Amino acid sequence: MALRSVHLPSETIDLILANINDDEVRKRHLSACSLVSRHWHFPAKAALFHTIEFSSQSDTLPRDSQDPNITLAEDFDEILHDSIPPPNTALLIKHLKVQLLFPVTVDQISSILALHPAIQYLTLRLEVKHCVAPSVPLKRINLKVLNLRSVLFSVPALTPWSKDDIDPYAVWLPNPTDDVGASADKPSNCTLLQLLNLFGEVTTLVLENALTRDRVMWVSVPSLSKTRTFPRPTYRSALWAEAQKLPKGLSVQSLVLPPTFSVLHNWVGFLLLTYTRYALEHLQHLEILGEHFFSRDALTIVGPSLTYLKTTVLGDSSAEDKLPDPRLFERANNLSHFHLSTYIIPDNLTGDPTIVRRMFDNAVRPISVLPQTITHLTLQVQTCKSFVKTFEWENLDRVAAKYNRLVNVQIMVTVGSITDWNPEIDFLFFNARKKRPKVTDGPSTPLLPLNLETMRKVIIQRLPELRNKVGDGLTVQISKA
């Protein structure tokens, strides 16, 4: 009796292969799956070569200090040779990860990318070396995701510090009458712009760590809720003039700045992108997380096309209420989704209700100046469990309910103890008393019931206007840290 073969649907095979997640055995298991039958061969092979990662090892660093350029070229030739895909696999590689321990020029990066014509996702960890006259790309690379995970760049010939920078409140922004052509006719010396010139349509650009080698003159200026640090006006002027040199070609639809340990790291790269004439012309999705802060400079440029904005504002306990600039969103005429994340964690253990209430009010103030086009509002709060009742939810209710087009409001609160958010407090007390103290969430604030559902109902009850306006569109979620 002849055996009857049974063929699984291709969707089922893809799901099976997608669940092989263990990196240690993934390659071996996918290789075995490719030998099951001709129906399994191509899906398994495509999954096997979907993501390729290569990096320079320590032995590929320049070894000849007498002539490092020659050694560097030889090392890059080795990397280029190793990056050549196996026969009949180049079109299967969709995600390419490149990590190099020595500086490379844009032309050298281009030669690596040329070997992988079908990539859709690109992750870079390298230093871009200055190239006097980089080659003009014959065909720009279109990507779904470009992740600059760790890219070191430079902007030569910076504008020096001038007496105009003495005013710490000066906010520089080019006027429409500025001569753009004078800067645009010259090739860019910025290695980040030289790198970005290789790409065309990029769905999502992740500026995870784009670091500059140059000395930047910073100045502290007030922002929505706290004092922030920005490049001085003359330095921003130099960045704007350099950004005009990026020719038309790069187009980014979504820009993401993940959290970093310092606001100063990605800010220069972010300014360069916002000052370009075409790169963010069609930007729709913007996420500025962590310590970053969106400024009026940036929103003036990217505002007209922006539909989604997600950002983080830290609660400020300053006694002086700092209202945000009412013109912050004046050009964001298409903004429909706004996601605000905040942390209400006092620096002390007392949990003074007045300080906690002021921190919450200052953190949510950006909601008061949003455009009337807002339809979806999300507020994400991380705080201590006893502070939730202290917050002025009625003020938030009154401010958010004024938006006529609002149809969906989502409030997500993550609660915990003070030591959950700031372990250093517990560590310091432990060293001082040689024992772990009992830390409360504030003796002057009555504790809410530990039942998270009860906490959720309390918040909903204090939002009557939003309940009447959006009905079932109002959702409140409470979770423990």
Image (cartoon, rainbow, N blue to C red):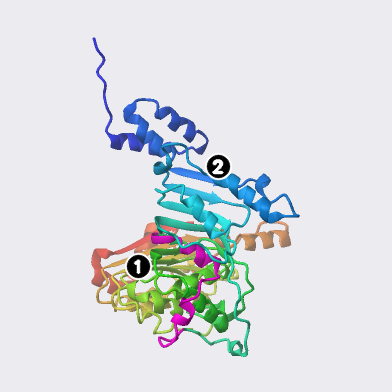
Specify the amino acid type for callout 2: Asp
Classify the position of the N terminus by image quarter: top left
Q: Quadrant of residue 204?
A: bottom left
Q: Earlier in the sequence, mark 2 or mark 1?
A: 2
Counting from the top left corner in percent of width and height, residue 392 is at 41, 75
Residue at figure coordinates x 42%, y 39% from the top left: 89
Task: State how far apart marks 2 and 1 are (Cα).
Answer: 38 Å
Counting from the top left corner in percent of width and height, residue 131 is at 57, 64
Q: Nearer the viewer, residue 81 or 305?
A: 81
Residue 457 is covered by the magenta coloring: no
Residue under label 2: 82
How many residues crowd mark 2 within 10 Å: few (<14), some (14–19), many (20+)?
some
Question: Compared to 427, does 62 lie above or below?
Answer: above
Counting from the top left corner in percent of width and height, residue 130 is at 59, 64
Q: Find the magenta span and give its range.
A: 174-203
Specify the amino acid type for callout 1: Gln
Residue at figure coordinates x 64%, y 62% from the top left: 424
